[in-house]
Image (cartoon, grey):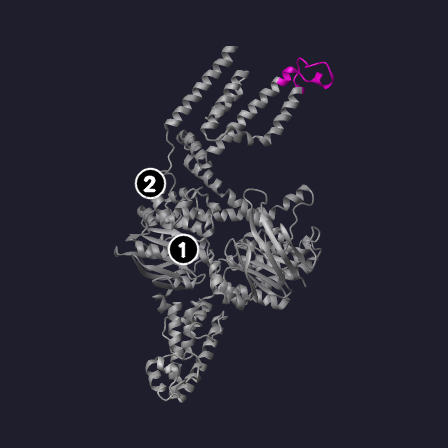
Amino acid sequence: MLSIRLENLSHTYQRGTPVEKTALHNITLLIEPGMFLGIAGRSGSGKTTLLQHLNGLLKPTSGCITFNGSPMDGHGMRDLRRRVGLVFQHPENQLFEETVCRDIAFGLSGTGLSPAEIDIRVRGALEAVGLGETFLNRSPFELSGGEKRRVAIAGVIVTDPSVLVLDEPTAGLDPRGRRELLDHIVALRRERGMTVVLATHDMEQMARHAEQVMVLENGSSALFGTARDVFRDVGTLERVGLEAPRITILMSKLKKVFPEIDDGIVTVDAAVEELKRLHRRQGLRWRDHDERCARGSVCCREFGSPPVGPQDEDPDGDGIYDACISC
Amino acid sequence: MATKKHIVETQGVEFSYGACGGPVPGAKALDGISLRIEKGEFVALVGGNGSGKTTFARLLNALLLPTSGTVYIDGIDTKDKERLWEVRRVAGMVFQNPDSQIIGTTVEEDVAFGPENLGLEPEETRRRVREALRRVGMERHADSPPHLLSGGRKQLVSIAGIIAMEPGCLILDEATALLDPTAREEIMELLRRLNREEGITVLHITHDMEEAALADRVIVMHAGRVALDGKPSEVFSRASLLREMGLDIPQVAELSERLRGEGFDLPSGLLDTDAAVAALERMLAGSRHAVHTT
Amino acid sequence: MATVFMTLVFLADSYLSFLLLLFFTFVVAGRAGRPFGHSLRGIRPILFIALFTLAVNSFAVKGTPLSEYGILCHITREGIEQSVRMVIRLLLLLTGASILTSTTTPLALMDGLAALMRPLRRLRVPVHELAMMMAIGLRFIPVLLEEGGRIFKAQVSRGAGFTSGNPLQRARSCIPVLVPLFAGAFRRADDLSTAMEARCFRGSAGRTRMKTLEFSRADVICVTAMLALSAVLFCMEFVKM
């Protein structure tokens, strides 16, 4: 179990030179075991820089990062990198071995495991990414793009990391490929109890899987909270150059007419349920209204005006509701 | 015979990669594609991996030749060796990887690459380069080295490089696939402008359904054939068919199709968010009708 | 032009010649818009080597000793003169090179080189294609450097160690970076050639250039000045003999 804490972490590239650039500014974050954390942001917002701190590739230029409460020093680096697996963007570009088996096993070099152990782990990793044993002796260079990517990911999970960090893992894949890959990651998390940190600008993907989300804007944290809360803030998302899922935008527009709608909806499934629920309640309200307003039943049927709210006001006491007068 | 009116016309086109590599040798990547694209259309071509859409694109500018059938670009048969370069000028293509198509050491130089290849006079080349950069909004970056630009800007440069050749049809082969949402929006905005204001024919090959919904016409490819071809609202209303082919539909369309499937009163072919909101409002208001009749 | 300058630098031997060359460089630097100080700053890294050369040569050359006392008896007058000359030559060369690279873009340099090589076309040397290869290579250097860096980080993240072991082991540990880098470069070359074909590239046949290298008035002045300088220096050196 590994928890990672970032406190006021900042990172400036090429400090002291005329081309210095502050990629991260005062980031405070606690990554707890078992979390599924999404990091959202445009290209250049600092996502990659943040991720590279999580396995010690980069050190903060100010602030600190601790692993289970203690900072990391040079000695523990190799061990840290086995416990925090970092999958880079387009990981298929890093394959180099003659066979898939040897490439995946690269991550276990220097661990002192027996060949038999290594074999078991490699097979396990391959299975976890949805590839069969037939791939073991093939050359990575003759595989398709999607297969190569999975081999590369297997090469990272073979060390059985507690934390899996992924930088845009579905970049360039088609919708089906994206879904499948993420399903494998979700299954992996469930089976091995891994913490997952996923950086992406694909909000629909994040909406489907992330529990907590941090939105970066020019290196600073613009939003942080549960997925629902973050996606609800359509305005901020738009400002930082991201798009809330279309379904969320639709529901928030609908909310202006039907205030009781839940605008934290992020998937189509949830939206369908919410609208059905609303429809049932509307039906009930109308029936209520009809039964109580003598004249209302006729004019409302003709003009179809929606109820403004569940008010039951009849100031004149003539049996006609204010909502009817407005139509 | 092909008429000049269609900028792209294919007749019974088939293609197999054959024994020299590519996907399953011998299997047909394209199995009888016959379609026409008129001048000024904005067409989106969608399909999953293996649907044949990339192969089809390569046939349009004669990077590949059909194993049977014919491809006509502005009336020219792509198999015509004498007019190969004319075909490639008319069917201008922008590719997916922003870095792997920029040649020049500066933006200006890269945009000039195409016109230079066409053998234009330096003065004319200079004029076209300036114009093209202005049209894509990159004139301020004319002297920038390309490696300092963002992915979206690099694609703008590549589009400028094709426009400078004055193509008949601008073909984008998944050119937005590796970009972030803001950059993608910028490109789509540019394509709409070029299409609407300047009448440039656009063929946008993509697997992003929200982008496809912005086109005037959507062609869906599956297993080397054209499965659907029509307006976005028509195509995306065929939700179950698209799902069978492993394709997504825009979330708004999916929502309305699911609700329709459960008996709710919604028009088919809803794509635009605001139109959907209005329709849902009406549906929820009309809920009283449904209850009243019971 | 630069080559001629370099030859002159080596020819010059008297202090007067050097002075003339220095003056010339000063003028050129001024015209190029680069204050002399700026160019000198580019020499700072080499200053150490220059001083070292000065020191070594002072001791190395045999001749009349400076004095009879202590360490100074090993330093000869000729030695000092020799080393001073060397240092001045070094400074002139470096300033010249620095002006060249700071005023001319790599591409223009390559165009110039390609223009000079043009006569080689008679010998069926594919000059144009070579020039294009050089230009494209130059454009991709930063891209490949970045990619190499990324791959290195990715392999380090997987537990690769690069600094331990004997030279053979260290060489082998470069494989996880070099193989993907080369594979990526080949793939990129493939994509690039497809893109070039799509933009109607068919070799140098019928190709024009937007930026043409033309002989302008400034060029005439430069060439004349260079010729004049060469003539003067020639006279000074050889007539002296």
Which amino acid, mark 1? Ile
Give whichever of C224, A132 is nearer the camera.
C224
Which quadrant is the C terminus of chain B positioned in? bottom left
Q: Where is residue A241 in the image (x, y as percent from the top left)?
A: 47, 58
Which amino acid, mark 2? Gly
Q: What stretch is highlighted in magenta?
A: C59-80
On the question of residue B121 being in view, the answer is no
Chain containing the residue with disc 2:
B
Please tell me whether mark 2 or mark 1 is closer to you in this view: 1
Q: Which mark is residue B187?
A: 1
Residue at horizontal 50 percent and vertical 13 percent from the top = C238
Q: Is residue B281 above or below residue B77?
A: below
Q: In this view, does B269 lie above or below B7?
A: below
Residue at horizontal 39 percent and vertical 62 percent from the top = B212
Q: Where is residue B147 in the image (x, y as percent from the top left)?
A: 48, 46
Magenta span has A303?
A: no
Badge 2 or badge 1: first in the primary sequence: 2
From the image, tell me which residue sits under label 2: B119
Please identify the quarter of the rendering in which residue B190 is found: bottom left
